Amino acid sequence: MTNKNLYTLFEDHFPSDKSAIAFEGPDVQTFSFEQIVIRSAQMANFMTDLGAKPGDRVAVQVGKSVEAVILYLACLRAGLVYLPLNTAYKAAEIEYFVGDASPALVICDPSSLSEISKISTKAGVLEVLTLNAEGRGNLTEGAANCSFDFTTVSRASDDLAAILYTSGTTGRSKGAMLTHDNLASNALSLHKTWRFDEDDVLLHALPIFHVHGLFVALHCALLNGSKIIFLTKFDALTVTEYLPSSTVFMGVPTFYVRLLSELGLTSEICRNMRLFTAGSAPLLEETFSAFSEKTGHVILERYGMTEAGMITTNPYDGERKAGTVGFPLDNDVRITDDDGKIVPDGEIGILEIKGPNVFKGYWQMPDKTAAEFRSDGFFITGDMTRKGDDGYYRIVGRSKDLIISGGYNVYPKEIESFIDEMPTVEESAVVGRPHVDFGEAVVAFVVPTASTSGLQASDVTAFIKEKLANFKVPKQVYIVDTLPRNTMGKVQKNALRELALKDA
Ligand code: MCA
Ligand code: AMP
């Protein structure tokens, strides 16, 4: 059996001159490909020596550093299943993920060690290790004493490489199980379609705990064996400083909105650029046009999701159309009605997909997995889609109750359940409202209990801030007497969206 470990695919594409730079950037140490190979071997040895075995999960909540990328590669090499967690998540959120995935190892920032250790002890974790945003901690210290040699563990195509949690519309987050082949097939497909070549330099500014920054961006460059300019955080000014030495940039729409307000963004600084891509949320046509006017570059919008990586893309050579997500990558797609019947071209339905990129299922949730697949293996994305006469696909809405804020998904149900736990609250409803910077902003309508007087919006915000990630905290809270309901008693979220919009 040939080894299908994703790491071997990357290593096969590393340049023959391994002293070539793999990572550099203003806040990181420069790493050559040789160092990446050696350091990932050392980390794989260290984790294996601690008792982690192929198939075990490694939960990771650390700041963005090259060492964190090496940790990801080390997990692949050791056959461990990488489980990245948003750095914004608070202890209560982490407790759920660690309890659900029962990882062998947890890696966290030193500042959260005591909190995470308590959670991990309860979940039977072997060891909690630290790694700070500068790449230091007892993980790198321990690995430094380990051998430079590690034979990458052999993996079959459908062995797990990673689990990424995605929130659910009905409460509990689901761990999407991604195999080595899911990730490899999507990486190869994007690398080819977006025409990566040896002279490319990727400017990387995305977080590395989600599909976009971790897989889409990093995999294309690793597979290309070319340099990554690695920014530890998105900052529009810093991006403009590094654009002249880059050729490819990937971002969520908020990145482009913020870049457009940088005076330094000109066609001159983009002279070496060959590709700007956008995704994770809809790119507004006005952002698309303004960017093209200012830089001469037409942003390539693509569409994907955690469960399948990238699904469609605008063409590299042909016309890139605003408001569309282009054509299917190497997966089959169809648009169906609620009963799963294919709708005629031009009509709106739900996008369903099938292909090597589509995940293996939700971790320990066979019923949820079964509910989201058709009997012939197509996965129901929940995205309302229309295929135009021109053949381009357009994402026109979502059948799932989901807000995408600055590229992060927020499920209203999660926030509502949390607000409803306040003893002073009768009920609540959470909706999205257009936001110039984040695309959509989270807004909450809250009804106090009959016996409560003087409940303030700030009380609700403070309550949420303590327990949930900051990006989930409503940008505005309205205290109201009642929620509008239809004759069936269902809360009319559209009416609330209109109210919020009018008020804005
Ligand atoms: C930060 N805040 C946010 C967000 N980010 N609020 C709502 N939505 C957000 N996305 C909060 C902060 O905690 C802070 O709150 C306040 O807003 C202002 O923060 P600011 O400093 O402006 O934010 P930032 O640190 O600059 O972050 C903004 C960001 C970041 C750079 C746009 O959100 C980001 O990196 N987004 C990318 C997400 C991403 O990679 N998504 C890909 C998912 P306070 O003032 O209270 O402290 S993968 C995916 O979707 C699929 C697979 C796909 O197709 O790609
Ligand atoms: P996630 O669960 O973080 O993987 O987010 C995936 C969701 O983001 C998809 O199901 C879509 O709703 C949305 N999405 C991703 N890319 C685009 C895009 N280019 N346009 C519109 N929505 C998008």
Image (cartoon, grey):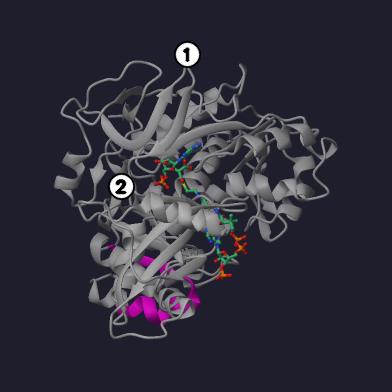
Looking at the rendered image, the disc whose residue lies closer to the viewer, 2 or 1, is 1
* Dot 2 amino acid type: Ala
**What are the residue bounds of the magenta stretch?**
103-118
Tell me which image quadrant ligand 1 sits in: bottom right
Badge 2 crowding class, 10 Å Cα cut-off, few under 14, some 14 to 19, many 20 or more, is: many
Q: Does the closest atom of ligand 2 sit within 8 Å of the Cβ of label 1?
A: no
Left or right, 239 with reference to 213: right
SS category of the residue bearing label 2: strand
SS category of the residue bearing label 1: loop
The residue located at (51%, 66%) in the rendering is 476
Disc with the residue nearer the chain's start (2 vs 1): 2
Residues at discs 2 and 1 in contact (Cβ within 8 Å): no
Please provide percent x and percent y for residue 274.
70, 29
Indicate which disc residue 420 carries.
Answer: none
Q: Which quarter of the figure is the C terminus placed in?
A: bottom right
The residue located at (79%, 50%) in the rendering is 241
Residue where numbered disc 1 is placed? 389
Is residue 426 visible from the viewing direction of this image? yes
Please provide percent x and percent y for residue 397.
42, 38
Please provide percent x and percent y for residue 21.
67, 45
Indicate which disc residue 176 carries.
Answer: 2
45 and 62: which one is in front? 62
Q: Is residue 117 shown in magenta?
A: yes
The residue located at (77%, 48%) in the rendering is 240
Q: Is residue 502 shown in magenta?
A: no
Left or right, 25 with reference to 427: right
* Dot 1 amino acid type: Asp
Q: Residue furthest front?
A: 487
Left or right, 260 with reference to 490: right
Is residue 148 visible from the viewing direction of this image? no
Please provide percent x and percent y for residue 179.
32, 40
